[in-house]
């Protein structure tokens, strides 16, 4: 039974009416009525999904049936070899990493991984990495650099895990170190936000030459609920916070934080994994091929320059 | 039948508290009533328990640099309101009133100065400006002062005091983590020394970027240092936090801070560390000859 979000109810109702009508159609000819309703359904979908509020985008980004990193990885790179562990403490299941072959390119893939049911949610810690996840990512990014392989990362996390042990093992240091190391990687790095991009937890594997964002995702410095609880002192203003944070792909393209919005099938990637993969694959391949002829120095310089330009201020000496 | 009556004093609600005349101040840590002037003379460190009171950027600049050697840069840089952010008030109004109230332009001051005669780039944060939060201005000023350190081949010191990234600039604030860390990666590649000084409190996006990336990480005694705030961790895990959790001493025990330094020893310690790390720096610079 597919999950329906609150704002999708009118679509669900119309779909139900159409299927009821179709089941009656054995006795009477309703094909005209059905096709009229189907036309109406298409328009309704375009209207609803074409005018999503920021909060509705957040809801879609968190859709329980949305494809996760491994769903894309197995479609993009059959024969993916997953590698484990940070060689320091353990293996974090909230980050998957390994070697894949994307068409004729050998690439390193690193992705934040959420679950889909209670058991896998727990196993994946709801996609909230611990320090060893970031350190595994760093180890394998350095490995990719050593053997001159490009790196692809998938961002999808409600945040780095705010746990006691995570603090003991240096959650902040693990993220900070990745930001420094990723800035100096001598190979192309393409990052794609496939779901939730919550703050430093997402950024910890998100510094690269290109940042792509799928249509129904969000990226910001804080989740709208937490923002609401801090600034409004109540969880109830999450819709307002989502709008205020300018966290949608369109906002972030305008603010020059992301490079490209990746299209999704109508209604979201959760409705059609294969179609979503086709769009993502095209964008990844195109961006890799734009980057592959650059020297290591040029890549690093351009990457640092790109981040240097981010932000808005006035005044200053230069 | 007094077993149900409180034997301990009730939790103070603030209404019964007697206002101290403002020449006196009570230590938050040991409760000692301290004479303000004497406390200031002691660098705002409690004379009884050594609790380090929070101090502003100006105080650290005076404490760390040789007298009158500070040459500020980008001191007129101001935050804008690119998201037109409004919560219970407009961000642009919040900025204006904070600037009026504090006399500061934003949560950081940067520049060049001398430490025992050695030219050094310095950045100091001010917790009093919107919780020392990092938005575009903090990120850009750190980025530029790091450039200055690299161009002149001098060490960089950053004194942090921050609740993290500034929410009112959304993802632009988040990008300052990447920007400052990227600049530090050049310092690192060039073999130039960077000392991070963590003061109370240093949390969130500041800890998850430049503050944890020092060649040497120093911390003041008792400073709160962490990624997630204690309240968030308690809510997320439902567990009680261990004593001393996320204090400077805890960070030393877990291997993330090199050394805890008393405020009175800060300059001496930094100077000592810089002598060890001077290999790739330009030691014959004349501060008055550097154009900033």
Image (spheres, rainbow, N blue to C red):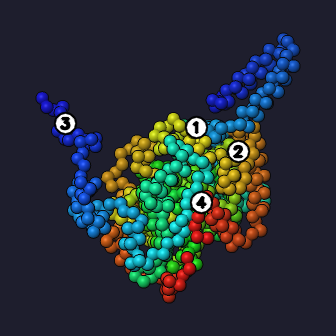
Name the quadrant of the N terminus of chain A: top right
Disc 1 crowd, CA 10 A, few/some/many (<14, 14-19, 20+): some
Which residue: 44% across, 60% down? B103
Chain to which the residue tagged by mark 4 belongs? A
Gap in angstroms between the C-alphas marked 2 and 1: 18 Å
Left or right of A285? Residue B26 is left
Q: Which residue lies furthest to the bottom in this view?
A: B284
Name the quadrant of the C terminus of chain A: bottom right
Q: Which residue corresponds to mark 1?
A: A239
Disc 2 crowd, CA 10 A, few/some/many (<14, 14-19, 20+): many
Q: Residue furthest left?
A: B1
Q: Which residue corresponds to mark 2?
A: A215
Q: Which of marks 4 and 2 is nearer the N terminus?
A: 2
Gap in angstroms between the C-alphas marked 4 and 1: 27 Å
Q: Which residue corresponds to mark 3?
A: B6
Residue B260 image offset from top left, x and y in percent: 35, 67
Q: For residue A313, which numbered disc appears in the image?
A: 4
């Amino acid at each position: 039974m597919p999950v329906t979000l609150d704002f999708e109810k009118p679509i669900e109702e119309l779909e139900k009416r159409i299927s009821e009508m179709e089941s009656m159609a054995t006795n009477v000819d309703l094909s005209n009525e059905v096709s009229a309703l189907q036309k109406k359904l298409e328009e309704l979908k375009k209207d609803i999904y074409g005018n999503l509020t920021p909060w509705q985008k957040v809801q879609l980004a968190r859709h329980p049936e949305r494809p996760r990193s491994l769903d894309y990885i197995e479609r993009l790179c059959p024969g993916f070899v997953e590698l484990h562990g940070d060689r320091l403490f353990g293996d974090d299941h909230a980050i998957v990493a390994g070697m894949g072959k994307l068409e004729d390119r050998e690439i390193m893939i690193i992705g934040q991984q959420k679950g889909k049911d209670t058991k896998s949610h727990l196993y994946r810690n709801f996609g909230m990495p611990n320090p060893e996840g970031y350190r595994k990512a760093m180890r394998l990014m350095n490995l990719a650099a050593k053997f001159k392989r490009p790196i692809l990362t998938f961002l999808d996390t409600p945040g780095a895990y705010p746990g006691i042990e995570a603090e003991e093992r240096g959650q902040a240091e693990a993220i900070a170190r990745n930001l420094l190391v990723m800035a100096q990687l001598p190979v192309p790095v393409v990052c794609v936000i496939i779901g939730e991009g919550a703050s430093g937890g997402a950024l910890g594997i998100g510094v690269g030459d290109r940042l792509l964002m799928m249509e129904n995702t969000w990226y910001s410095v804080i989740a709208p609920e937490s923002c609401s609880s801090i600034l409004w002192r109540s969880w109830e203003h999450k819709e307002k916070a989502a709008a205020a944070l300018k966290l949608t792909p369109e906002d972030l393209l305008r603010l020059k934080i992301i490079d490209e919005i990746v299209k999704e099938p109508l209604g979201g990637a959760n409705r059609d994994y294969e179609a979503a993969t086709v769009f993502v694959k095209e964008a990844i391949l195109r961006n890799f091929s734009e980057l592959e002829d650059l020297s290591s120095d040029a890549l690093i310089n351009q990457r640092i320059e790109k981040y240097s330009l981010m932000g808005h201020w006035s005044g200053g000496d230069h | 039948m007094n077993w149900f009556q409180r034997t301990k004093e009730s939790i103070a609600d603030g209404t019964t508290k007697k206002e101290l005349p403002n020449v006196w101040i009570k230590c938050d840590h040991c409760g000692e009533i301290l004479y303000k002037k004497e406390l200031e003379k002691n660098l705002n460190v409690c004379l009884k328990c050594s609790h380090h009171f929070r101090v502003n950027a100006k105080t650290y600049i005076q404490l760390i640099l040789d007298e009158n050697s500070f040459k500020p840069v980008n001191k007129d840089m101001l935050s804008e309101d690119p998201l037109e952010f409004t919560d219970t008030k407009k961000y642009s109004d919040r900025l204006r009133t904070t600037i009026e109230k504090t006399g500061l332009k934003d949560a950081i001051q940067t520049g060049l100065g001398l430490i025992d005669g050695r030219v050094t780039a310095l950045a100091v944060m001010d917790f009093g400006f919107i919780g020392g939060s990092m938005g575009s201005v903090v990120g850009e000023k750190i980025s530029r002062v790091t450039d200055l350190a690299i161009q002149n081949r001098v060490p960089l010191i950053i004194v942090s005091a921050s609740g993290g990234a500034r929410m009112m600039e959304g993802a632009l604030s988040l990008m300052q983590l990447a920007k400052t860390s990227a600049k530090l990666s050049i310092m690192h590649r060039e073999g130039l020394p960077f000392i991070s000084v963590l003061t109370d409190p240093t949390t969130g996006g500041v800890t998850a970027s430049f503050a944890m990336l020092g060649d040497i990480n120093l911390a003041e005694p008792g400073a709160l240092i962490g990624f997630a705030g204690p309240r968030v961790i308690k809510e997320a895990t439902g567990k009680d936090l261990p004593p001393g959790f996320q204090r400077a001493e805890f960070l030393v025990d877990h291997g993330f801070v090199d050394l805890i330094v008393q405020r009175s020893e800060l300059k001496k310690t930094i100077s000592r560390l810089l002598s060890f790390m001077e290999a790739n720096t330009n030691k014959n610079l004349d501060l008055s000859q550097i154009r900033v």
